[in-house]
Image (spheres, coloured by chain):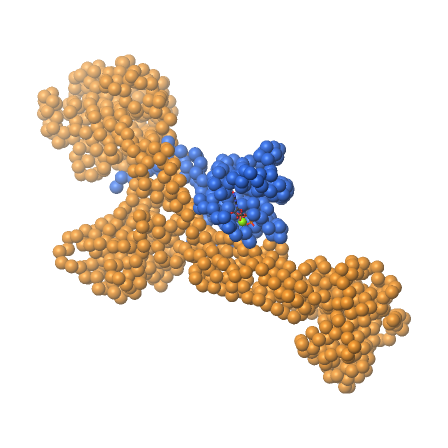
Amino acid sequence: MANKAGPQRPNGTAQAKICQFKLVLLGESAVGKSSLVLRFVKGQFHEYQESTIGAAFLTQTVCLDDTTVKFEIWDTAGQERYHSLAPMYYRGAQAAIVVYDVTNQDTFGRAKTWVKELQRQASPNIVIALAGNKADLANKRCVEYEEAQAYAEENGLLFMETSAKTGTNVNEIFLAIAKKLPKSETIGGSGSGQGRRLVESDTTAKTSTSCCK
Amino acid sequence: MGSVDLLSLVQSGFTGETVLACLEVSKMQGWVRTTRYLAIISKSGSSAFFVLTSTRVPPISPADVSVEGIVPIDSNFKFELDTETQHEDGHDLYLSVSSNKSKLLFEMMPSSKSNAFVGELYKAVDNVVRKSGPLEYNWLNRYPPVIRHDCSDNGLKEEVQDSVVDSPDSLSLPRESIAKGSTPIAARESVIRYMMSKKEDQYMYKQSFRIFVGTWNVNGQSPTADLTEWLSCDVDPPDIYAIGFQELDLSTEAFLFNDTPRENEWYKAVVSGLHNGAKYTRVKLVRLVGMMLVVFVQEKLRQYVTGVACDTVGTGIMGKMGNKGGVGVRLDFHSTSICFVNAHLAAHVEEYERRNQDYRDIYSRMCFSSHHPPKTIKDHDHIYWLGDLNYRITEIDPKYVKDCVERDSFQKVLEYDQLIKQCRAQTVFVGFKEGSITFKPTYKYDTGTDNWDSSEKNRAPAWCDRILWKGESIEQIEYRSHPFLKISDHKPVSSLFDAKVRIIDAVKYRKIHEEVMKKLDKLENEFLPQVTVETTEITFDTVQFLVPQSKNLIIANTGQVPVKFEFIKKLDDPYYCKDWLNIEPYLGDVIPGEKCEVKVEVRVDKKSAYKLNSGQDQLYDILVLHLEGGKDIFITVSGNYERSCFGTSLETLASIKEPIREISLGSIIDKEKKKDSFSSGEGTYAVPKEVWFLVDHLYRHGTKAKHLFVQPGLHSEIYDIRDWLDNGSQESLPGSVYSVAEALLLLFESCPEPVIPYEMHTACLNCASNFMQCKQIIQGLTYHRKNVFIYLCSFLRELLSHSDDNGLDTKTLAALFGGIFMRDKPVPRDVSKPRSSQQQLDRKKSIFIYHFLVNDYPDLLPPLVSS
Ligand SMILES: Nc1nc2c(ncn2[C@@H]2O[C@H](COP(=O)(O)OP(=O)(O)OP(=O)(O)O)[C@@H](O)[C@H]2O)c(=O)[nH]1
Ligand SMILES: [Mg+2]
């Protein structure tokens, strides 16, 4: 019996490891957080997307040159009354996408307060991306690209204008985050403090999975 | 647990059948692995493949084990062993078993046990092929059909798409573990590897490379000759060189200290002897005493060489010294692992057993430990073994040998070659190949000549210097000696190979890798727990003090996996809901298609009323319904709380002249904020009118009532009394005196603070035995509290004066009111205090009150009821 060795990777680079990251989406209601996730994960778009009441959870993997990044995505409820629950989801998150609607100036203001809150309360090395969504509605634009760009630069945020409807920049923004995330410390997701604990096998003890721990 | 134990354990669970083999494996479903035990069990000439589960891992009694599935080993039975996908860590060997529509996939640890198991499986299948008549499988009927993966229609059919990992089978267990959110990332990685290897031909191709392997025992000589003769005798430059030397240095110095100037001399000679048709770069040089191996690769190919490592094994004196043994270099070239071993095996004509043993020692002991887990020689796709293996020509007249080889008729002589004989007997170099020898023996010559050794020993010349290989897609182009090089008593030998190496098309690889990931993501998202709740808003209209109300919330599992739900704490809250809320059950399991009804109950009691009355809290809470391993749903619970004198501070009550519901919530909140400023009593009642109403009623109608305060009232009457107090009425106070008495106790209990404030309790308890000091404490109470205390105590003394009628005694009342006036701080839900210390406290409290029920205290101001 011939022993075939080696995982077959290009040039033998060890690409076997998957890095797992918790990513949270924040932003005012109806800016299109759920739509962005739906586009990214399933490639779909719904004109009538129900408002999120809770925190939706999905996973999606992004393949980079040298690593594979698995996102655990928490899509939060944007309605103001649920604001106080947001820390449950951004605590322990390694990445956040703060979304606003380019056709609505208020949502941009709200996005800025989210960024401030994250800078104050979230883990200090969280990677934050700012997404100006609904970029397809060019004729209704209220927030100028340059304004948001300048703000993002000042605050060290990744920035892209996106459209969940057309798909523009949706994969790109997740990819940009994946690239910016530090890979070494979180290989295998250990010690990342996220809710879903990673175990070697399903025979290990029942895990506590509430996301607020 | 050894396999023997497992086998006998399983056997003892199967009386009447024979368990041929047994093995612990992991069953792969989706990316979930679960431990299983496989058994090949036979009876009446036929056999079947059993999948067993155990409640314990490993099982320690036959009772732990139960049968999960059976596949009869009949003509439909097929199995496939996937060694292609064995991983770097050497852990994963896949066995896929199929029969008709069912297909199972197992992962096993490559070991002698798994080899033995697979061996039995081969035998069992072979048995089916060779049996002419139909085999008898009726003995399997005693197992329930549901666990049989057979061809009958009532058998469990597993859906099979293009691959098993694409379709988690219909047993619910793995889904459950996915739903638990414990998706093991390591398992996911191995599934990815497995799926990738299944698609290998879509991104992998093979390309041929030329490899030059050379060996020379240089007998301790210096390189005084030009080596191009040996190393560059071919037209095309090879891609890789592996050049081995033996007896590089025979000095004691080299032997003892493994240090020799020869290393550099020969290395330089080799470098200048390399083919000048290409540029080479050194990959690795390794030396142990006189054995040296150096590997070169064409410069332009260096980037495809990774994981370079080397090791040495001494098998010489005492079985470990470096005068004999082997040195090895391993590397990955593109995606093929290659190992070169240069060996110098035991000398002496008759010692072939020693040589066999040396080979085995090198083979097992050589270990490239910079890899995790460490790699041994056998873990390589391609192995090249070169060296002075020292096997001789024996059992034949040396003269005859010389004659034959002189005439270039080697065949006859090679019949007597120890290595060829030993290989045939499979005692050494099992699985290795050697090309046919068409060159003269390479040993032993008189140095500097082509003449056979002329010393008196008269030994037969021999092919001591050999090159063997193992692995697929290796073709030998040349196998020859280089007699023109005469500086040693050996001639150098070389071999050229065309070796096909696996190369990954990086672009295609990435594309397929991404596809595989997408597939797994889809699967994983599909198997996330999903529920629907009919509403996320639970609204109660009017909620009154003490009156419970409830609504049901239906949680329906609309997903594909069992759901574990739980109402979880928000952030740093101590509890998953506010204290006026209760959820029953607050956690549970729902299987797909089923529902669970959860009762959401609001009840504002003495603990929660004050916060609601004072505006510190509202009847509003957001519950977080968490699905284990999945999303959260927010459920908002709200209602209108009807404010009440219950749960209002004594100060505020004393300052309100009208019924509480006649004044606005705002002004109550206002009063509660300023309540400390009423403590002078100015513009307020001496005691809250509610207290007065209740006490006065009891004074007039209840002093003779049997066991007043001890006997409980009725809920409905207490609600009526509450309404009467809150709204005001011309009618007389409703309800029995017992209900009135209970309402009075409740009024005190629902105050934000007991009559004697918390911070004074310790002082009270410390001086409980001293009436003087007790009086001083009461004297120090604020205006309303002192009044209420004295007013109540006076009333209790009045009651005690009728003890013949009402049957009350001082101790009972003292204990009861001790607990009211000095009520303990509320403890959080789910926390219980130790009972013994509580009893101590309660006793002291009642002693404190007791004084005021048996003594006069004219020195304390009598209560004033201003109007
Ligand atoms: N034209 C356009 N419409 C969009 C885009 N993204 C989302 N929408 C629409 O905007 C509405 C709100 O989108 P959602 O994805 O539900 O917004 P949300 O941020 O998740 O809202 P909450 O869940 O309430 O926080 C939906 O009707 C979407 O169809 C976009 O890129 N272009
Ligand atoms: Mg949403």
Q: Indicate the quadrant where residue A63 lies.
A: top left
Which residue is depicted at the point 26% across and 25% down?
B210
Q: Is residue B717 left or right of residue A136?
A: right
Q: Is residue A43 left or right of residue B674?
A: left
Depth check, front residue: B776 or A186: A186
Where is residue B364? Give x, y as percent. 31, 38
Which residue is depicted at the point 71% across and 78% down?
B739
Q: Indicate the quadrant where residue A157 lies.
A: top right
In this rendering, the count of numbered labels is: 0
Depth check, front residue: B680 or B301: B680
Residue B436 showing in the rendered view: yes
Where is residue A208? Give x, y as percent. 51, 54
Depth check, front residue: B808 or A95: A95
Picture colour for chain A? blue
Where is residue B855? Give x, y as percent. 84, 75
Q: Is residue A102 left or right of residue B607?
A: left
Residue extending furthest toward the right = B859
Q: Indicate the quadrant where residue A153 lies.
A: top right
Residue extending furthest toward the front = A139
Where is residue B696? Give x, y as percent. 81, 77
Depth check, front residue: B838 or A112: A112
Which residue is depicted at the point 56% across and 59% down?
B536
B469, above or below B43, in the image? above
B460, above or below B186, in the image? above
Picture colour for chain B? orange
Which residue is depicted at the point 45% across and 46% down?
A44
Task: Name the quarter where the C terminus of chain B is drawn.
Answer: bottom right
Residue A183 showing in the rendered view: no
